[in-house]
Amino acid sequence: MTAAHELAERDFDVVVYELRELPGGKARSMAARPGVGGRQPLPGEHGFRFFPGFYNHLPDTMTRIPYANQWNGVRDNLVTATEVQMAREHGANELITPASLPTNLADWDKLFVFLDQYEREVAIPDAEKRHFGLLLARLLASCRARRFEQYEHQSWWEFSGAASRTEEFQRYLADGLTRSLVAAQAKEVSARTGGYILLQLLQDMFRFNGQVDRVLRGPTNDLWLNPWLAKLRDLGVDYRFCHRVEELRSDGPHVSGIVGHMVKWTETGPISANSFEDSADYYVCAVPVEVMQPGEYGIAMEGLRGVSDSIARLEGLRYRWMNGIMFYLAEDVPVVHGHSIYIDSAWALTSISQRQFWPGVDFPELGDGTVGGILSVDISDWEDGRGRYVAKGKRARECSKEEIAREVWAQLQAALNNDEEILASSNLVDWFLDPSIVFPNSTKATNLEPLMINTKGSWDIRPEAALPEVDNLFLASDYVRTFTDLATMEAANEAARRAVNAILDTADWDRDDRCRLFPLQEPGGPFWVARKADEVIYRLSGGKLEPPSPVAAQDGEVRVSPAAGLTRPLQRE
């Protein structure tokens, strides 16, 4: 959609072939249950939407999508969540912190309560807290070459020295956050990616009026994707739903056409109908990485794989499942004004209570009129975590739909129902599992929409948006090399902008209106000086010396000092 938008604004004739019945891919919302008595359907999701403050490409596009009389268009449908909750099992109280630097007395009070509770109840030794702070400082002081040649080839687990740290360090600072936020294990996700995305989130959190956590004030398609589709059609985009492209035909390094089938959607996936063919001057593949790989769901492109190392290398990229389930409640349970991270849940759960952010949605007019609240949950670990309550000892992907729903609900209750019953089973009206999880039989699940993960070293095999070996094929998806780096809506938007810029270059576009790109922001001052110094240190030492950090541990505390951080040999933690 981003590529179509940018191209159509520059007067290109654009045709979009969309596999689904709805626009938006993983970002879409959908009808979970039909409405009764003239009511609207209950909204469902692939997983809840999350717009961190460091997103810039996506909000920029949203300002160009008209919505009602809003000055910033669809972007004005984003609202800020004010709290983050860390929920724990085994009777431990939840930890709740403001999602950004406090601006009023109430938020300062919440922050002090959180810090006091964290100090008393989270048993991470002070030395390990300082160690973690210094790790983040090392990342900020490192030059680009060190990041891509050294940290890219270390896992977050290796970089953090988690193996020799306490169980609490591993639980809170190593594995817990990576599993919940990016569907990746600390032992496999790149330290460069995991570390720098964490730093972006922390910068948002400690920035005055920062917006670390933004959400839409209603269902995604209503508030964003349907208005976007209308905008694209107003620009002349020919948007064709239920079309599956199955082959890219080529003549050497040149794509000559596409072949595919129209499809009809069923509970077990798409069924092919009439075939179609088409050709164009330029082609943009805005599909997930598994569709670019050989296999059951892949587009046939053997000729291109033979001439393009960039396409052939895509087989080395990995993906995992990160899909959502929604629980519909008779009475709303706000839980917290933002996202909850269930830090020790077996299946790496995160959730958000939707109704508090949807003031314009008339809940009695949804479904059968009995739903008063929606708890939207992401399940990030389908492979390694084992069920504890209903699906005992089973991985999520081994379970039936009913087992998944009952086990997730039990994990939520175990974390939230401590001194009082927050989630009562009697309050549960219905649930809806992401339909991308399909069940050929009762115990074997297939995921039609997994998520690419940034394993260590994966940057080396990820492609640019423009393929050097193919003259008219461009890539616009979250696995493309971008500033954003992580598999997100923001990365997909940025990749599409890069693809469009490459098309403009190929077409000898004479207008100075390339798509804008937004690098990630990092602290300046002494950290900028340290990064410049590290360029010299890294080159001269061959990576054997640490970067010069303006942060050091002194007298048992982590302090900022421009004089701190003399280089020393790297040592294994």
Image (cartoon, grey):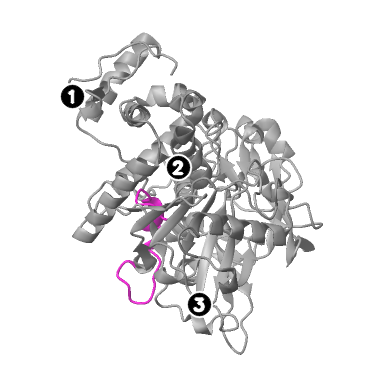
Q: Is residue 31 left or right of residue 331?
A: right
- Mark 3 Cα shell of 10 Å, populated few (<14), some (14-19), many (≥20): some
Q: Is residue 213 visible?
A: yes
Q: Is residue 102 left or right of residue 452?
A: left
Q: Assess whether residue 67 is covered by the magenta stretch.
A: yes
Helix, strand or loop at mark 1: loop
Helix, strand or loop at mark 2: helix
Q: Which residue is mark 1?
A: 562
Q: CA distance from mark 1 to mark 2?
A: 44 Å
- Mark 2 Cα shell of 10 Å, populated few (<14), some (14-19), many (≥20): few
Q: CA distance from mark 1 to mark 3?
A: 55 Å
Residue 98 found in image quarter: bottom left
- Residue 418: give its label: none
Q: Nearer the viewer, mark 1 or mark 3?
A: 3
x then y, percent, for residue 541: 36, 9
Looking at the image, how many numbered discs can be counted on the residues? 3
Q: Is residue 424 above or below residue 564?
A: below
Residue placed most toward the observer, 232 or 124: 124
Q: Which residue is mark 2?
A: 505
Residue 213 found in image quarter: bottom left
Helix, strand or loop at mark 3: loop
Q: Nearer the viewer, mark 3 or mark 2?
A: 3
Prevailing secondary structure class for the magenta stretch in the rendered image? loop
Q: Is residue 162 above or below residue 115?
A: above
x then y, percent, for residue 409: 60, 60
Q: What span is colored magenta in the figure?
A: 51-72
Q: Which residue is mark 3?
A: 372
Q: Amino acid at mark 1?
A: Pro
Q: Is residue 252 left or right of residue 336?
A: right
Label 2 near label 3: C-beta < 8 Å?
no
x then y, percent, for residue 480: 52, 40
Q: Nearer the viewer, mark 1 or mark 2?
A: 1
